[in-house]
Amino acid sequence: MTSTYKDSGTASLKDEEEFTDILEERRCTTDLGYALRTFNPQPYKGAPSSSTSDLKKAVLESQYLRYIAKEIALETGSSVEKVRQEARGILEEMSHNLQLGFIRLMAYTVNKVFKRLFRSIYVNMEGLNMLQQAIQESPVILMPNHRSYVDFLIVSFILFTYDIPIPVIAAGIPLASMKVVGEILRRSGAFFIRRAIGSDKLYWAVLSEYVRTIVRTGCAPLEFYVEGFRSRTLKSVVPKLGMMDMVLEPYFKGEVFDITLVPISISYDRVVEESLLALELLGVPKPKESTTGLFKASRVLQEDYGCMHVNFGRPLSVRQLCEGKINRSEYNLIPRDLPQRPSTEIQDCVNWVAHLIVRTQEEGSLISPWSLMACLLLQAPITTLTEEGLQWHGLTEKTLWLRKLVLDFRGRLNWPAHTTDSDVMSSTVALHHSIVHHKAGRVCLVQDGDPASQDPLSPEEGVMRTAAAVLMLVSYRNQALHVFVRPGILATAIHITKSTQKDELFSFFCFLRDVFANEFIFIPGRASQDFDEACSLLQKCGAVHMSEQEVTVLETGLEVLSFLQKLLQPFLDSYQLIFRYLCENGAHVFTEKQFLPAVQNLATKLILSGDLHTFEVLSSDTQKNVLSALRRLEAVTKLRASQQNEYKVNKAAVRRTGDILSGKIPPESLHAIPDARL
Amino acid sequence: MSGFSDNIMRLSGRMLSQYLAQRDWDGKLTRAPHPGIIPTCSIVILSDNLPKQEIMKWNGWGYSDSKFLYNKKGQAEFTGKRYRLSGMIIPGLREWMESTFGANLQHKTPAAPILNSSAVQPPTLNEAFLKELKSTGIPFSHDAEDRVFRSHGHCLHEIFALREGKIGRVPDLVVWPNCHNDVVKIVELACKHNVCLMPYGGGTSVSSALECPPEETRSIVSLDTSQMNRILWIDEKNLTAHVEAGIVGQDLERLLNESGYCTGHEPDSMEFSSLGGWVATRASGMKKNIYGNIEDLVVHIKMVTPQGVIEKSCQGPRMSTGPDVHHFIMGSEGTLGVVTEVTMKIRPMPEYQKYGSVVFPNFEMGVACLREVARQRCAPASIRLMDNEQFKFGHALKPQVSSIFTSFLDGLKKFYITKFKGFDPNRLCVATLLFEGDREKVLQHEKQVYDIAAKFGGLAAGEDNGQRGYMLTFVIAYLRVVLGFKYTLLVLDICRNVKARIVRECKDKGVQFPPLSTCRVTQTYDAGACVYFYFAFNYRGLSDPVHVYEQVEHAAREEILANGGSLSHHHGVGKLRKEWMRETISSVGMGMLRSVKDYVDPNNIFGNRNLL
């Protein structure tokens, strides 16, 4: 009944995994019959069955919330009862209302929609089995990556299909305000969190107690996106720690014996909202989530989105992860149901766990042939892409070469078996007809636009139009970046420093790792492991030769090194450009609102004049990442008093960072000392 | 204020001159320790045995004649005549053992039957010390059996080593002082000749406190206080008794009872443990809710140290004279000197005693009830809460009933609780209660407690169940290999986490059958509780079960500390728990204790190396 195939990426590894297409069976049965199937999951054995009203009551009557309410009443001068009333309101707005009937409705609808959108949804059964086991043993946290709105209910859908308890899911509050749909989501297990909670103490208190109570009682698995929001760039986002902290606290405080984290990697051949994402990054605001919007979007149902892979990772025991990293007795001296600021040791541990999860998600995601092609297309000159097009033959050859490199780098590849390579190539391009088209042996970029429009585009508008197409390509490239980033950074270090000395390369590696910590996921304190990994991968593919002290480039490795270096070049160019803007153009104090368009203007000019070869700097994501990086490097500071996100720039420091990045001055060895503890 | 009671003097003033004497249950004298034998099956249970006339086991807990064994029909039986359970067939035990541990009759590990004297290292004697000791006339011995008997407490690894015939460093000499002045002489001689002294009371330590430090090169002298076992006087006006520190718990109670008094101090080891040991380890008694723990009971202590004798000048019930020096002594675990005499509070014997028990639908409800009892400060003399596993164990220890009527009644009770009241037999737990006082007050008190229990879903489950619960405490020690550690603090999370940790560790260490991992709340305090964890596992298939046991115990202890439990509620630190002392009491705290030791005993004469 169901077809299975092997994930070819791990074919060389021992843990070969089988993926099963869960839609295949759905296509053979009636949707209604499926939605009404008997659902009888084995819940967490320690959990007493509790209703949502029990949960809310437990939260409201918790010692913790009472304490905070009293504190707030004292601070604001209002009555405790009023504060508690307010808390009740927050909880009502937030709380999920999981009901089996709505799960069935959800399953029915989702099933219909998914069958339309996707050819197949592949799930690794082994991971699902491990999850089923884990759910009975301790409270489970499901941690998928978030690349598309479609993600939102996929996990619930799969768990419903396989008789596993339905999770409650942390969602952004805008979803709740959608008419009808918001309520359906709520009853399908979503709970809603406001954006920008800031310093609203009561809100934090209600939210954290709500989350902790769910974990503590283990009444349902908890699902949340550790990246905090949908990644617009399809690249992993540096994890947010607030929710992670709340989830782990019951373990730190000994309220549960253990917590199981299950990283889930969802990968798409084609992302439903691909064009919206690019526009959003270019500053076209994202449409507000609304029910009518949802219906308008229903034209997306006409399209083919290929396959989806949901890879359930190995369940991770928090107890084992934290072993030796923290000392839980720090909670001994204050009653455990009162708030206590965690020590830096605990905070570091939470941060480390969060990064580890995102890395594990990356490792579990599958790279499509299209991502490989995107990597290569982006290395061609832009005029080739937009005008005469890239030779199909050359692209095919290069893609197959890259496939081998990915496998050498232990990436998981989703390369269809039992199909000729040229069929794979052409079907891939066909699937992505919205971005490229293949004609007469050449591949060109499709540029969205209205050919019927009378007014010719201004040069600036032309740049933006190309940028939209390029950024779509960039996002698919990004899906493969995690495989290349460590060796890529080493290749960049070799390219810039021209050094063969291992220690010099290591210190530059650390510098790059530090500068790009907002772009790529690096587990804190693991610089030397990352470096070793990069070295061994480059050695494995025959690019370099390693000795005790030296890293020498091999003749045979030039192709690999140049590919890797070019892969990361757009990041270096973008960062340098923004550094240059900050040093030359900007004032000493600026707001984010001024900064983003100004950078965009400058970049557009330079692209037109042919001085800048990347469109990525036009992406607001890149711009914000540079700002965060500079803040981390203390070259830019956020002004505390300011309401409108004002920043103060230390031009000398920015210039210095730029000079190190271009190899003019060597990096300080400050960052070369890895944190021994982590 | 003070007066002598001749009656008591005469009663207690017995001894044998050259050899140690141990009394049996009736207070008769018997020549003591000689090897008994306790072959065991794989886990814990003891089996058939050659009876000997000696009273105490040399390599196991308690009396030689009291043990669990499987009889010819394959039924479990508890032998001897000393306990309520003695001589009874316990039909449920075997099945419980088999289902809980996968233990069965076919797998037995016999113990080394008789002590092999040649396995004992010859004593390192300090001739000059010995010569002067002889001149004092204080009895001593360097007989191998005497030395081995005093070389250990009752930690699992200690008993296991003995059973396997492995004997490490043992004391070189045993001395039996007869009174305070004898101790003064011995300590003086020890200081003069640089001999290491290790006080020995009842030998019931479970903290490796009696283990001889292997690095000790001096002659080690075990100072056995068993002959100092008299009640010196009773002050009926002030309700105090002045007692020599070597007296064993049960003797103290029996002798006081004869004059109509009691101390009310009843640690589970009271059959064998001594007053001096209680003071040295900060012991706790089952009925502390009425009588208090040892620190509440002690009014005056006399201790002989290398710097001389320490005692207070009066017997006032309370003083504001700086930090209480008694607190340097209590818990010093034999590192500072020998406690020789203690004045203790006594109480008139209670007119009426009543056991009781309450069944709760689950452990959480039971704990909630105990907290309410603590809040209302109405705890009976003792209140204990056993978890479900222990409830089942208690059930397995039910003796065979003779009449059909009783078993019918039992069936009816079970039906009522599980079917009618809807208690899940795999979740319910039981609290055992002991009330003491005058009859009317006891009944009133009982009602109050049962009323509270009812609010938490508790059902009164009869006196018999309660009494059996307490008997279990004494008998459980015979099913050795149980680990006991007591800790204070917030109960629910810690119980679950520690039990889960034990199960997980056992699994990780290759234990084939799920271990028994159980706990009970044995004491409530205004500000917390004391939880006793037990665990036992079937070690079939393990190459080094003792090591596994120690690893599991270690992990369990870390878990307790991480969950806000204390290092020890009453067993003390000894050498077993030393490694956690610094994090428990801080570096400054360690320094304070260290400086006391350095002043009182600069040459480490009391060199058992406990505590610090």
Image: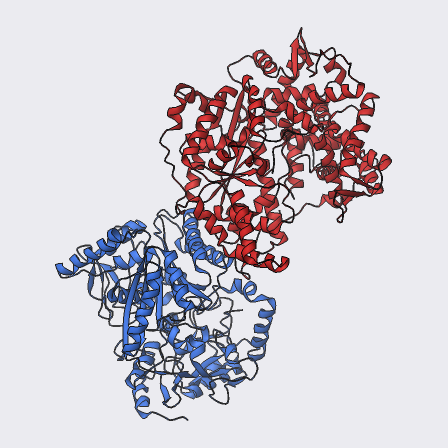
Chain colours: A red, B blue
Name the residue rendered at 35%, 57% in the picture.
B387
Q: Quadrant of residue B339?
A: bottom left
Left or right of residue B364: residue A351: right
Q: Foreground: A169 or B96? A: A169
Left or right of residue A552: residue B499: left
Q: Foreground: B551 or A225? A: A225
Residue that protrudes farthest toward the top in the picture: A440
Left or right of residue A639: residue A92: left
> How many numbered badges does the structure rendering display?
0
Left or right of residue B576: residue B63: left
Q: Could one spot residue B215 in this view of the protein?
A: yes
Q: Position of residue A198 (x, y in %)?
A: 65, 46
Q: Is residue B309 above or below residue B153?
A: below
Residue that protrudes farthest toward the left in the picture: B404
Q: Position of residue A139 (x, y in %)?
A: 46, 44
Name the residue rendered at 61%, 28% in the picture.
A409
Where's the N terminus of chain A, which quadrant? top left
Q: Is residue A247 above or below residue B138?
A: above
Q: Is residue A71 above or below residue B53?
A: above
Q: Position of residue B473 (x, y in %)?
A: 32, 66
Q: Foreground: B415 or A311? A: B415
Q: Position of residue A490 (x, y in %)?
A: 71, 32
Q: Could one spot residue A258 in this view of the protein?
A: no
Q: Quadrant of residue A380?
A: top right
